[in-house]
Image: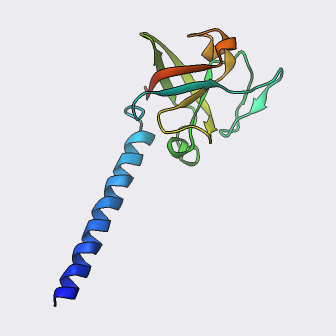
Amino acid sequence: MINSLSLNFRTLHVTYILVGLILLLTESVHGQISNGTGLATIIPTGPGPITGACGVEYGPDDLVAGVPTVVFNSGEACSKMIEVTYRGKSSQFEVVDTCSSCNTSDINLAPAAFTQFLPELDGIMMGVTWVFVD
């Protein structure tokens, strides 16, 4: 009987953990807010357009972003707008790609989006936050 209770307790505990993770990921995808502050880096677009994970072509002059793979959620984030904030300045960008090297609070920006905050030569912004706005 004690072994049965112990097994049921473990099963219940694991279930609660899984439900918590699912809710956390769902909130990120429907993205009330990114998970704290992160890094923003430049998407290496080259001189011509590339096709992002959303199937949309974009280039260095487009105001677009790539979100972390876990937030991208197999394309659920495509065409959504995000608002990125850095040092008190905010700008909005369309999600057209994923960022496989990003942590949940990081973001990738096309060069024109990045230069809304810093010169392209800086290459990285630390302390960025972002949220979905639609």
Residue 49 in which image quadrant? top right
User: Does residue 16 lie above or below 6 as drawn?
Assistant: above
- Identify which residue, 67 or 41, lies in the foreground: 41
Position of 110 compared to 36: left or right? right
**Percent from the top left, x then y, of residue 62?**
68, 18
- Identify which residue, 62 or 115, lies in the foreground: 115
Q: How is the image coloured?
A: rainbow
Q: Quadrant of the N terminus?
A: bottom left
User: Does residue 16 lie above or below 56 as drawn?
Assistant: below
- Residue at x-position 76% and y-position 26%: 45
**Percent from the top left, x then y, of residue 126?**
51, 21
Residue sitting farthest toward the left: 1
Residue sitting farthest toward the bottom: 1
Q: Quadrant of the C terminus?
A: top left
Count of numbered circles on the image: 0
Position of 120 compared to 125: left or right? right
Position of 62 compared to 13: left or right? right
- Residue at x-position 56% and y-position 10%: 117
**Percent from the top left, x then y, of residue 16?**
28, 62
- Identify which residue, 68 or 72, lies in the foreground: 68
User: Does residue 113 lie above or below 100 as drawn?
Assistant: above
